[in-house]
Image: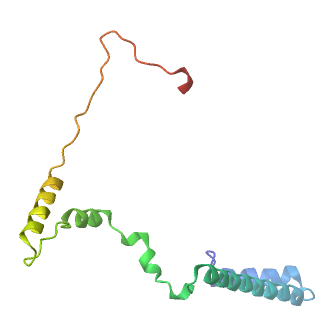
Amino acid sequence: MFGINGPEFILLLIIGVLVIGPKRLPEYTQKLANLVKEVRRMANGAREQIKEEVGIDIDDVDWKKYDPRQYDPRRIIKEALLDDDTKPVSAGAPAAVAAVAGAAAAADASPKRPERVVQRLAPGEAAPFDTEAT
């Protein structure tokens, strides 16, 4: 807790008792107890507010599912690349449906890309410059 080990904590406790004194010690222990109760009350209030707004209990959430360390980008990409999206047409389907599905698959397999038009400046021509862009 806060990087303090047992003997250091006992030493701080003894120094605190000596500084505060025996007359004021009950008062400060009561203040500490009230502070702990208030923090617990606030934590329970936040828990209840989350439960009301989200609709689930925090204890019922599987937090391991949301841990970002479990996701390996290499595995995700590999699975996405190896995933087969093409579904075979069932044997009981009519021939026309199979022909349409085959034609659609062939059209999807080789989509035509539009030709890229590159406009080049003539030799010695200055590039366009926008004074408001800088």
Colour setup of the view? rainbow
Name the residue rendered at 83%, 88% in the picture: 29
Residue 53 spot, x, y in % from top left: 62, 79
Name the residue rendered at 36%, 11% in the picture: 125
Q: Quadrant of residue 71?
A: bottom left
Name the residue rendered at 30%, 23% in the picture: 119
Q: Quadrant of residue 118?
A: top left
Name the residue rendered at 68%, 86% in the picture: 44
Residue 96 spot, x, y in % from top left: 9, 66
Front-most of residues 129 and 45: 129
Residue 124 spot, x, y in % from top left: 33, 9
Residue 105 spot, x, y in % from top left: 14, 59
Q: Quadrant of residue 128?
A: top left
- Please say whether residue 76 is visible from this viewpoint: yes
Quadrant where the C terminus is found in the figure: top right
Q: Is residue 109 above or below residue 55?
A: above
Front-most of residues 124 and 8: 124
